[in-house]
Amino acid sequence: MFAIVTTVWKRPELTSLMLRHTKQVCAHRNDILFYAVGSEQELSKNLVESEGWVYLESPNTPLNQKWNNLIQTLPRDIQGIFILGSDDFVAREYIDKALSAGYDVCGSNSCYFLDVSLKAGCRFRYDQKTRLVGAGMFVSKKTLDLLNWTPWKGTPISSSLDRRLMSNIHSVAKTLKMKAFSDNDIIIDVKGTGVNISKFIHFRSPGNACDVWSILQTITSEDIFNQIKAMSDQLYRGA
C-alpha cells in the first residue's frame, strides 16, 4: 500500500476539487490510502471526509510539525508516501510512474503554475537537474524509517518546506536511490486563491508562459475543470 498525503487550510472550494480529482485519477488502483491533515476542526474534517479521505486534526503552525503529525499517524507497513499540496492537480500517468519507478525518493524537476486570479500560467523548471519540486514527490518507507517518520523535522517553520524536506533527505541519502524526472510530467499548482505560501510571480519569468488551462483540461474531469474556470471568473483581477 501507498499513502497520498496532503495538508488543508482555508480555500475549501479548491481543496474539495483537489481531493476529488486525486481520488478520481487513482480510481483504477486499490493500493492507495488517502490522508489529509487540517486545522479548522469540523469545517475541514467534514470537507476532507466528504471526499473520502482520512482526516487528522492538527494546529496549522508550525507547518512542518503539521506535516510530521500527519506522517506519524500512517500505517508503518506502507511502501511510501506521495506528497501533494491541497492546490496541486496531477495526472494519473504521473502518479503511476512515481509509485512504480522503484526509487526511494523521486519526483519531477518541473511543474506548471496556474494563477486563477490572473488567468495566467507558466511552466517552471529548476536549473539544477537533480532538484525536485515538492508537489508530486514520492518518499519510500526506507527513507521514512531513516528519518524516524518525521521528514520535515527540525526547527519550527511554516515556509520553505520543500527545502527542509530535501535537506533532511540528503542527510540520510547515502543508501538511497533518488531520481528527478525531466519528462513532460503534468503537475499543476493552482495559485491566486489568496492563501498560498508562495506566489505565482515567484515562478513566472520571461519566456516560460504557457497555456496551462488546456493542460489542466486534459487531466481533470469536465465537471472539475468547469468549476475551476468558474472560480477563476469570480477571482479574475486582470493580468
Image (cartoon, rainbow, N blue to C red):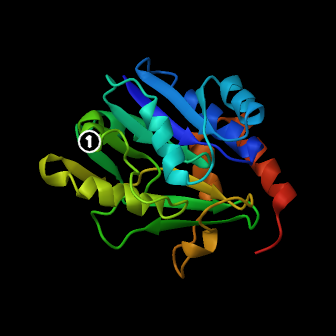
Residue 165 image-quadrant placement: bottom left
Answer yes or no: is residue 92 visible.
no
x, y percent for residue 60: 63, 48
Give the camera-side residue of 69 and 83: 69
Name, please, the residue furthest toward the bottom.
Answer: 206
Label 1 crowd bin: few (<14), some (14–19), many (20+), radius 10 Å? many
Answer yes or no: is residue 175 visible.
yes
Q: How many discs mark residues in the rendered view?
A: 1
Residue drawn 83% across the image and 69% down it: 237
x, y percent for residue 45: 70, 30
Residue drawn 63% across the image and 22% down it: 52
Name, please, the residue furthest toward the front.
Answer: 155
Give the camera-side residue of 118 and 42: 42
In the displayed structure image, the side of residue 33 where residue 77 appears, left or right: left
In the displayed structure image, the side of residue 157 where residue 77 appears, left or right: left
x, y percent for residue 75: 39, 23
x, y percent for residue 2: 38, 28
Residue at label 1? 143
Residue 30 image-quadrant placement: top left
Q: Quadrant of the C terminus?
A: bottom right
Residue 191 image-quadrant placement: bottom right
Q: Quadrant of the N terminus?
A: top left
Name, please, the residue furthest toward the left.
Answer: 175
